Amino acid sequence: MISEKDIIEINKAFNKSKVTNKGSLAYAVKTTTRSKNWLKTAAILTKGILIDHAFEDGNKRTAAAVIMLIMDINNIQYNPEKIPKIIIKILLKNMTNIKNIERCIKDGIA
């Protein structure tokens, strides 16, 4: 389980920016507590960080790091070079639907 504090610490490792959308981040973390599906958890947190702009700066890097952390925790094999491409695709398509974000993450690591 990844906590709000964990995500904030990941962001601080990149640039020590401020949380600008605490409500969205808190909601995303709380929502993941109901899911045992790693992919859904990754999608919900990605949306909360990336689309809802949880931080002043470093949202893309933080979202990528969170996706990789979730995959590591769940022993999911992935190519780290593909993760930034997933992030860019989600942004360019302005994906807000969790199922679409799930699909993008899954397709990107295959």
Image (cartoon, grey):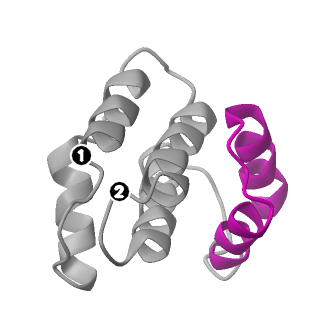
Say which quarter of the image contains residue 51: bottom right
Mark 2 vs 1: CB contact within 8 A: yes
Question: Toward the viewer: 1 or 72?
Answer: 1
* Residue 73 % position (x, y): 41, 47
Task: Identify the image quadrant of the N terminus.
Answer: top left
Based on the picture, tell me whether residue 98 belongs to the magenta stretch: yes
Q: Residue at x 42, y 27 (%)?
A: 32
| Amino acid, disc 1 | Lys
Q: Quadrant of residue 26?
A: top left
The residue tagged 2 is 54
Q: Which residues are magenta?
A: 84-110
Label 1 element class: helix
100 w.r.t. 84: above or below: above
Tag 1 residue: 22
Binning the other alpha carbons within 10 Å of mark 1 as few (below 14), some (14 to 19) or many (20 upward) gives some
Q: Main secondary structure of the magenta part?
A: helix
Q: Report the side of 89 relative to 9 (left or right).
A: right
Q: Which residue occupies 18% across, 74% down?
A: 12
Question: Magenta stretch: residue 95 in it?
Answer: yes
